[in-house]
């Protein structure tokens, strides 16, 4: 069974640009989560999508947004990039059962903002 | 409010030593879930275990064991006879139902484990 996939692996942008990160969940999973892991820091929750809708978001500015497509894949968009947005962005998926769900993670996209 | 504390930032052991990674959590909910994940140098988080708040049985899986104690709000992870391949960052996480915003999963800051040959 294929795991969670993310693309691209690495992304280099300059300050002020926009970045788009993509995630495909495990087959059968309806929930997708996005996390930011800045260097040396833990995982910070960004967004949770389930059945095409945003269910919850973390304490991030509105320039972090995303969407979930009918096939449950997801996109994370970061507008007006700032240097501190440089981080590993991890996507996870789960079966959509709620609080007790186990989240399975992808390999991440490393975003570098110059 | 949710909080997960992994007080040990880094631990270094020699191969074959036993090592325990501590995790202390805070929650107001009676129903919640605790998780441990391993993040090897490749970066991908690997799920290790899930435990719900009503199941205080300890669990053993090979060289791994977990000790869940609600009385002290702790969910500690022990690796017996550590190996070099155990070198990674280990994260403890807590999920609770939360309020109107739906549930959130909060991760601890992680403990970096170095196992030397």
Image (cartoon, coloured by chain):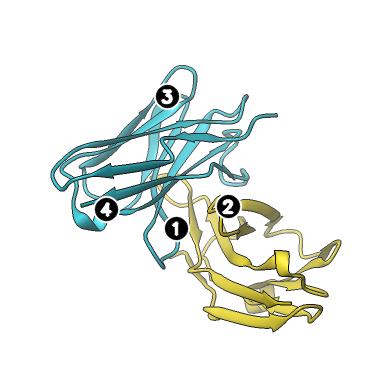
Chain colours: A cyan, B yellow
Mark 2 and mark 1 residues within 8 Å of each other at the beta carbon: yes
Mark 4 and mark 3 residues within 8 Å of each other at the beta carbon: no
Which chain letter goes with mark 1?
A
> In the figure, residue A19 lies in which quadrant?
top left
Badge 3 element: loop
The residue that label 3 is drawn on is: A52
| Residue most extreme to the top | A70
**Is A106 rendered above or below residue A27?**
below
The residue that label 4 is drawn on is: A85
Residue located at (75% from left, 73% from top)? B78
Badge 4 element: helix
Circle nearer the viewer, 3 or 1:
1
Looking at the image, which is closer to me, B8 or B114? B114
Residue located at (45% from left, 63% from top)? A42
Which numbered tag is attached to residue A43? 1
The residue that label 2 is drawn on is: B45
């Amino acid at each position: 069974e294929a795991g969670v996939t993310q693309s691209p692996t690495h992304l280099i942008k300059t300050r002020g640009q926009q970045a788009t990160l993509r995630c495909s969940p495990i087959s059968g999973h309806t929930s997708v989560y996005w996390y930011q892991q800045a260097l040396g820091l833990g995982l910070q929750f960004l967004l949770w999508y389930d059945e095409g809708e945003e269910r919850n978001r973390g304490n991030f500015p509105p320039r972090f947004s995303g969407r979930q497509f009918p096939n449950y894949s997801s996109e994370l968009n970061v507008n007006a990039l700032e240097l501190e947005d440089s981080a590993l962005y991890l996507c996870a998926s789960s079966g959509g059962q709620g609080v007790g769900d186990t989240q399975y993670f992808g390999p991440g996209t490393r975003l570098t903002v110059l | 409010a949710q909080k997960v504390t992994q007080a040990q930032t880094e631990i270094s052991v020699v191969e074959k030593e036993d090592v325990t990674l501590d995790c202390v959590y805070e929650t107001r909910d009676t129903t919640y879930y605790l998780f441990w994940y391993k993040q090897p140098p490749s970066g991908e988080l690997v799920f290790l275990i899930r435990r719900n708040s009503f199941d205080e049985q300890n669990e053993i899986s090979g060289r791994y064991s977990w000790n869940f104690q609600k009385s002290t709000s702790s969910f500690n992870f022990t690796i017996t006879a550590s190996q070099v391949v155990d070198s990674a960052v280990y994260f403890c996480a807590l999920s609770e139902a939360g309020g109107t915003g739906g549930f959130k999963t909060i991760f601890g800051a992680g403990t970096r484990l170095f196992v030397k040959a």
